[in-house]
Image (spheres, rainbow, N blue to C red):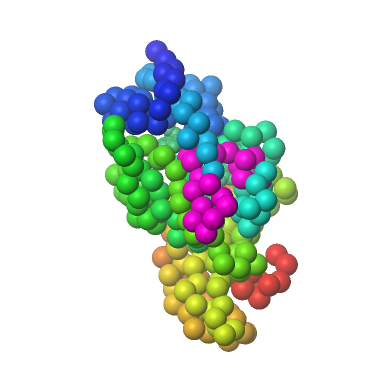
């Protein structure tokens, strides 16, 4: 049988999750409730959090904090998070965005996870809470590597990241066959700070190019210290597929994803329309 527990605090929910292997956290439920409705999840406890801190955003300063229960609709309603609007708008249609949470997106299997791709290019920290007590910060890249290995446990309380000094230097693109609500063929997020006209510690992330969103380390190395001219973009395109392990699914084949990624990366870096 399936039950529901409502928890007034994040710590209470984390305690239940750490002590009960059949307990499942319910974020917005856009994926969990699909499993329930389609008969894949029939036993255990759905853990719901009513703690307002779970849905709180701190967006005014240089360091941004989003509770894991913050929805895509909340992100879209925040002017201070305008640089994240393209990523939040990429998640499903309006009804899904009203429910879908930042925390749930961190666990969504490829080709889902578009918002997480943006967070990865922002070098976000995940606040993980395992059992009662306080959370600890883990780099998102480490968290996703753990998810890939199946070794992530506990509750995500929120995410934290630095606001890009220049929001125009943050880019997000989702490539899909069906517009505007299609599932990703792939997505790309890029934070491209420039110093003296040259890339300084650029961060690029891909979605749907591996089982979890990944950083494009080869591209970052190719761009570091370079002006974003034709030669640098060509070098980035050549390094584009390093570390990629895309799947073949109903949306696109592995071959197609590998073929089109360098093209879309080149267009993003050149500031061309997709
Ligand atoms: C029609 C449709 C279209 C969609 N389109 C997109 C899309 O375009 N792009 C995209 O990225 N996704 C898409 N999704 C997938 C999904 O809606 C999003 O990924 C969403 O962000 C998931 O969040 P949620 O809160 O609904 O997750 P839930 O369904 O609540 O949870 C998903 C998983 O994460 C776990 N979880 C949730 N929150 C936490 C937490 N704080 N700590 C620990 N574990 C947690 C749950 O236990 C569960 O295992 C779509 C889904 C549907 C049904």
Residue range in magenta is 58-76
Compared across the picture, whether 171 is left or right of 242 comes to: right
Tell me: residue 146, above or below residue 260. Answer: above
Tell me residue 148's x, y (percent): 36, 49
The picture places residue 57, in percent across and down from the top left corner, at 54, 43
Magenta stretch: includes residue 98 = no
- In the image, farthest residue toward the front: 61
| Residue most extreme to the top | 1
At a point 55% along the width and 64% down the height, the residue shown is 164
Within the magenta stretch, is there residue 70? yes
Q: Examine the image and state in which quarter residue 99 appears.
A: top right
Q: Residue at x 54, y 55 (%)?
A: 61
On the question of residue 21 being in view, the answer is: no
The one nearer the camera, 236 or 241, is 236
Is residue 157 shown left or right of residue 250?
Answer: left
Q: Quadrant of the N terminus?
A: top left
Above or below, 181 against 234 in this view is above
Seen from the viewer's position, the closer of residues 54 and 102 is 54
Horizontal side of residue 74 vs 219, given as left or right: right
Q: Nearer the viewer, residue 39 or 73?
A: 73
Pick out the residue farthest to the left. Answer: 19
**Residue 177 percent location from the top left of the image:** 68, 52
- Residue shown at the point (48%, 40%) measured from the top left: 68
| Vertical side of 146 occupied by 192: above or below | below
Residue 196 in sight in this render: yes
Q: Position of residue 182 (x, y in %)?
A: 66, 46
Q: Give the camera-side residue of 141 and 208.
A: 141
Q: Going 53% across and 22% down the picture, which residue do you hit?
A: 37
Residue 224 vertical position relative to residue 146 in the rendered view, above or below? below
Which quadrant is the C terminus positioned in? bottom right
């Amino acid at each position: 049988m399936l039950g529901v527990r409502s928890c007034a605090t994040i710590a209470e929910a984390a305690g239940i999750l750490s002590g009960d292997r059949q307990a499942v956290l319910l974020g917005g439920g856009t994926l969990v409730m699909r499993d329930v409705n389609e008969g894949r999840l029939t036993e255990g406890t759905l853990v719901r959090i009513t703690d307002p801190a779970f849905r709180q955003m701190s967006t005014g300063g240089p360091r941004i904090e989003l509770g894991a229960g913050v929805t895509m609709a909340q992100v879209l309603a925040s002017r201070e998070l305008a640089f994240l609007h393209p990523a939040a708008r990429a998640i499903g249609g309006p009804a899904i965005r009203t429910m879908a949470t930042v925390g749930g997106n961190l666990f969504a299997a490829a080709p889902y996870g578009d918002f997480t791709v943006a967070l990865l290019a922002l070098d976000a920290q995940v606040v993980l809470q395992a059992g009662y007590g306080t959370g600890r910060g883990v780099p998102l890249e480490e968290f996703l590597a753990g998810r890939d290995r199946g070794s992530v446990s506990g509750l995500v309380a929120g995410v934290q990241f630095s606001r890009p000094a220049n929001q125009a230097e943050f880019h997000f693109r989702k490539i899909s066959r069906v517009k505007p609500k299609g599932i990703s063929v792939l997505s790309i997020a890029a934070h491209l700070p420039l110093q003296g006209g040259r890339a300084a510690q650029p961060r690029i992330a891909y979605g749907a190019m591996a089982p979890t969103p990944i950083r494009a380390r080869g591209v970052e190395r190719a761009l570091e210290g370079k002006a974003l001219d034709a030669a640098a973009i060509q070098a980035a395109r050549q390094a584009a597929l390093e570390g990629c392990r895309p799947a073949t699914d109903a949306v696109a084949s592995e071959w197609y994803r590998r073929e089109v990624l360098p093209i879309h990366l080149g267009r993003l870096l050149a500031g061309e329309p997709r």
